[in-house]
Image: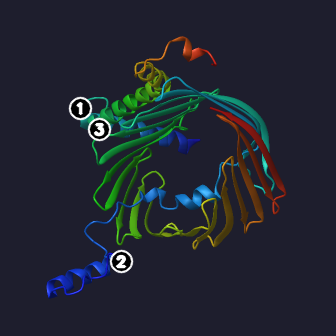
Amino acid sequence: MASRVALKVGGKGKNSGKGGRGGEGKSRTECLKEWTDWSLHKAKVIAHYGFIPLIIVIGMNSDPKPQLYQLLSPV
Amino acid sequence: MAGFPPPGATILGDAAAGKKIDEVGKKKVDYFNLPCPIPFEELQREAIMSLKPELFEGMRFDFTKGLNPKFSLSHSVFMGPMELPSQGAETLKIPTAHYEFGANFIDPKLMLIGRVLTDGRLTARVKCDLTDDLSLKANAQLSNEPNMSHGMVNFDYKGKDYRTQLQLGDGSLFGASYIQSITPHLSMGGEVFWAGQHLKSGVGYAARYENDKMVATGQVASTGMVAMSYVQKVSEKVSLATDFMYNYLSRDVTASVGYDYILRQARLRGKLDSNGCASAFLEERLNMGLNFVLSAEIDHKKSDYKFGFGLTVG
């Protein structure tokens, strides 16, 4: 128990030290990493939901242009 | 007849006629005009096509509807047991059923293939020819579960008698490969890869010799894999293939022998393995656009019997 408390205190001290060095809450590399993670995550969600609709839109606009009912009917 | 010199020819004429006989008798190899080799990842494609068909267990129904020569939609239903990776010797199977919707757009310059399952997993493949020689390929498997999505991008450059490829994958995976034609029949190549997440890297070499009747390939990699394959085209309709894979780090050996009958209305592929596994795969054309598929795999060592049937329309 005591050792765990000691580790936590040590961690807090380290964090404040790093912040003090950077001049703000997060350093620049951390900001960049967070931004790339966020943008990659958004790109993944867009690809996941948008890929098949993209293929359908490109296909429906290629010639000879197919009709809309052909998308749904089994013939 | 064309090679014989006319009577009374001069010395120059003799030399020229001599060269003609040489060409007719044995084709002179022009080492500056070699054919472009097969891409590195498709080195063993004849052996893989003959020995590793898409075996399945259960019922499969595929329907492809073409709206356009370039654009088509596909609906696929599968019902059958799905194998789970299990630690023990026995195989664990759960019955599953799923529906898969797919859309394909196939153009000479751009190919887009997307498949989505009922549980939300998306498989996407993109192939784009940026210029005549440079092409971009991308595959991705995206799922709703966190950390279960993967993606890979390849850049392929095709030179006069060589091909190179650069591969970038998620989890900081880098790979590069190069293959060169050495003679009109022989091509050799190598690859390197580096996987950042698993901290693994490796080098591999491969060679492929082919002529009209046979294809022989060999591949060695620093991951411990040694693979050799040989495919002989016995006639227009029959091919025999054999494959040998050895891992010198884990001392795992597998050898297999198989046949591939390409008939007018059917294609039958059968294989026998050194792991005690016999498998067969039949695709029969019942009618225009209607194919019947039968798959069987009997694993005598694990006592695992898999039989599947299906219908493919369109």
Are both tags, 1 and 3, on one chain? yes
* Label whose residue precedes the other's in the sequence (1 or 3): 1
Q: Chain of mark 3?
A: A
Tell me, yes or no, whether dots 2 and 1 are on the same chain.
no
Q: Which residue is mark 1?
A: A23
**Tag 1: amino acid:** Gly
Q: Which residue is located at x 65 percent, y 71 percent?
A: B253
Q: Amino acid at mark 2?
A: Met
Q: Nearer the viewer, residue B263 or B190?
A: B263
**Relative to B155, is B115 on the left or the right?**
right
Give the CA distance from mark 1 to mark 3. 13 Å
Dot 3 amino acid type: Thr
Q: Residues within 10 Å of mark 2 (few under 14, many from 20)?
A: few
Tell me how far mark 2 sits from mark 1, CA to CA.
91 Å
Q: Nearer the viewer, mark 2 or mark 1?
A: 2
Dot 3 alpha-carbon crowd within 10 angstroms: few under 14, some 14 to 19, many 20 or more: few
User: In the rendered image, which residue does mark 2 sit on?
Assistant: B1
Looking at the picture, how far across and down is residue B62, in whole percent?
A: 66, 32
Give the colour scheme shown.
rainbow
Which quadrant holds the C terminus of chain A? top right
Question: Which residue is under mark 3?
Answer: A29
Q: Residue B313: horizontal and vertical position, in percent?
A: 66, 32
Marks 1 and 3: which is nearer the front?
Answer: 3
Give the chain letter at badge 1: A
Judged from the image, the secondary structure of the residue bearing numbered disc 2 is loop
Residue B108 visible in the current orientation:
yes
- Which of the 4 image quadrants contains residue B246? bottom right
